[in-house]
Image: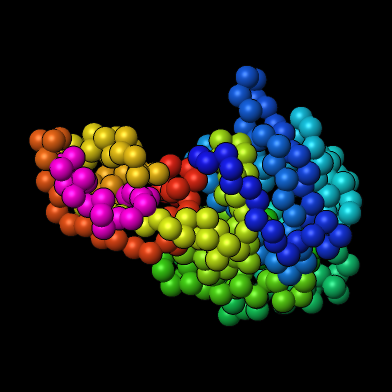
Amino acid sequence: MDDRISHLPGPAGEAAALLDCAHLVRRFGDRTAVDDVSLRIAPGETYGLLGPNGAGKTTTIRMVCGLLRPDSGTVRVSGQAVRTDAGPAKRLIGFVPQDVALYPDLSVRENLRFFGRLYRLPRRRLERRVDEVLDLIDLRARAGDRVDSLSGGMRRRLNIGAGLVHAPTLLVLDEPTVGVDPQSRHAILESVSRFGEDGMAVLYTTHYMEEAERLCDRVGIIDRGRLVAEGTTRELVSLVSERDRVRLTAAGDVAGYAQACRRLVRVEGAALTGEHGNVVELVVKDARSLLPDLFDLAREQGRLDIRSVEIDEPDLETVFLHLTGTALRE
């Protein structure tokens, strides 16, 4: 990671921020899971929080939602401090966990009513809100069906609806499309893209880079507990504008080859990807002039056969690989 990289300017200034996290720190024994993380999200903004596994995303989200007390730092939603007790700020937050948390023997509508009653919504307001949410998640036609009769994608959409029914000002979505089919994933993304229209702020985590590029107004990249960069996709890509992304598909000792590539001067990041771990992704300076060195290195390895080479212009995946040294799904 390049220590010179700083946060890029974004639209969520201090006065406009709906979510304001300042200098969050959380330790577990000798391990610092979150180390001085600050971020702000403006009303109507969707903010993507990306990071490798174990980078501190989940711990940060738990502190934002008041499920975990920070060792230091503050979280405010609409100016109100978020605490781990049942304070008023928690009523402003809708949290959609990665695991589906619904009652399978209740209908779609009954589940939404149940979660609305937890927030003590008046009966008439609750019924109106349930109908609004059914339209938002496109499940009105299945409102009377039991949850255990729904497809996995429909359950994911209803899981989001349960976090929306009390009309939060901040919605936190933790990997909402994990394990769903492409059609359901598209429906979820279409729904999320409309959430900011009424001024709701969205904090979104995902392992799919294309989702962040499609949905998020700004993106923050967290690695080893620290927020190493944030900005719009265009601003982040400008950090690696003179770098290329190279994908080599190979057979043999691919892991050993990736390790050897990391020692080359112009290679700034190398990661194993692909369904079978047979793809090496590199962030490099001037890829075309470096190709001879990459092929020479493959010959030196002796047990490697390069099957294909692709060179791409910089994108958000390139930025992530450059900053963290890993691919997002590792």
Q: Residue at 63%, 66% (x, y): give it.
A: 217
Quadrant of the rendered structure where residue 40 is? bottom right
- Residue 224 appears in the picture as rendered: yes
Q: Is 63 left, or right, of 274 in this rendering?
A: right
Q: Residue at 21%, 46% (x, y): give it.
A: 294
Q: Is residue 63 above or below residue 13?
A: above
Q: Quadrant of the C terminus?
A: top left
Front in this rendered view, residue 253 or 2: 2
Could you say where residue 268 lies in the image, as x and y percent from the top left?
40, 44
Front in this rendered view, residue 92 or 263: 263
The magenta region covers: 281-298
Quadrant of the rendered structure where residue 218 is? bottom right
Q: Residue at 77%, 71% (x, y): give it.
A: 199
Could you say where residue 18 lies in the image, as x and y percent from the top left?
81, 59
Q: Is 148 left, or right, of 9 in this rendering?
A: left
Magenta stretch contains residue 286: yes
Q: Name the image colouring.
A: rainbow
Front in this rendered view, residue 256 or 115: 256
Most prominent secondary structure in the magenta stretch? helix
- Residue 177 appears in the picture as rendered: no
Could you say where residue 133 lies in the image, as x and y percent from the top left?
69, 73
Could you say where residue 63 lies in the image, as x and y percent from the top left?
73, 41
